[in-house]
Amino acid sequence: MAIAASPTGQHDRPVPGDSYVQSFARGLEVIRSFSAQAPLQTLSEVAERSGLTRAGARRILLTLQTLGYVSSDGKHFSLTPRILDLGFAYLSSMPIWNLAEPVMEELARQVMESCSAAVLEGTDIVYVLRVSTRKIMSITLGAGSRLPAYCTSMGRVLLAGLPEEEALACLEASSLVPLTRHTVTDLDALRQKIAQARRQGWCLVNQELEEGLVSMAAPIQDRLGRTVAALNISGQINRTSAKAMQENMLPALLSAAQAISRLLAAQSKG
């Protein structure tokens, strides 16, 4: 079976063909059913979260257990550290992040706030690297963590790097729910904010993802000027106001993003 891609690049549904392995797709759904909110699951819970029958989920879980990616105490299943091999394969295939890490560490040291890099995947951003100075969110973030693009600074920068029609399609495919009293969910207002990020080359989001959290992002671009990732700094509003972040930290953020972009360009030439 072949895959039908949506305008946002997500794989919406399989269509008849000979290049789609349904059992493999179901295995990935089982893996993705585990999360910070559901690290331990019963067979019934895995089946429900992955949309499979109990028999189908059981076969996949036992296969993953045999391969060392899942462990079980007889009732509950959980992922093992070996699952990190799958994510590391992506990071190791993109040496740019090894080069970017020292730049991000210096940025975090300079502004004394946490620093992250992310890419766009469907309607979400996916963290690929994070340098944390202190815990600033109620959830734990790390490589592989996902957040909605529409209400995050990195998400809006990444959407700003798309053609307008693609950015709009991504917004229309998003579940635009108010995560805080500050979250912008109006489609036209979001289009304006993304257009502003496109014009100015950076974006600041003030308490739209989580109360008290302020973040600012800039694009990481390849040698052709295409936005391929985003870099941000984030902190708590009671320590760093949105105005102070923009006035005092924007130059350092832009400089770091440009430095990583130059590293990426040099790497692609090599």
Image: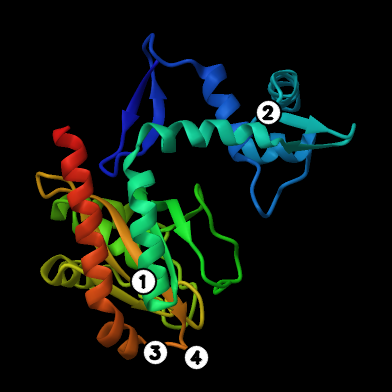
Q: CA distance from mark 1 to mark 2?
A: 38 Å
Q: Are marks 1 and 2 in contact (CB under 8 Å)?
A: no
Secondary structure of the residue carrying tag 4 is loop
Q: Nearer the viewer, mark 3 or mark 1?
A: 3
Q: Residue at x 56, y 31 (%)?
A: 85
- The percent coordinates of residue 40 (x first, y second) are 77, 44
- The percent coordinates of residue 169 (x first, y second) are 25, 51
On screen, residue 196 above or below 90:
below
Residue 168 appearing in the image: no
Horizontal relation, residue 4 to residue 83: left or right? left
Q: Amino acid at mark 4?
A: Asn
Of mark 3 and mark 1, the one earlier in the sequence is 1
Secondary structure of the residue carrying tag 1 is loop
What residue does disc 1 label? Answer: 185
Q: Amino acid at mark 2?
A: Tyr
What residue does disc 3 label? Answer: 241
Q: Nearer the viewer, mark 1 or mark 2?
A: 2
- The percent coordinates of residue 78 (x first, y second) are 75, 38
What residue does disc 2 label? Answer: 69
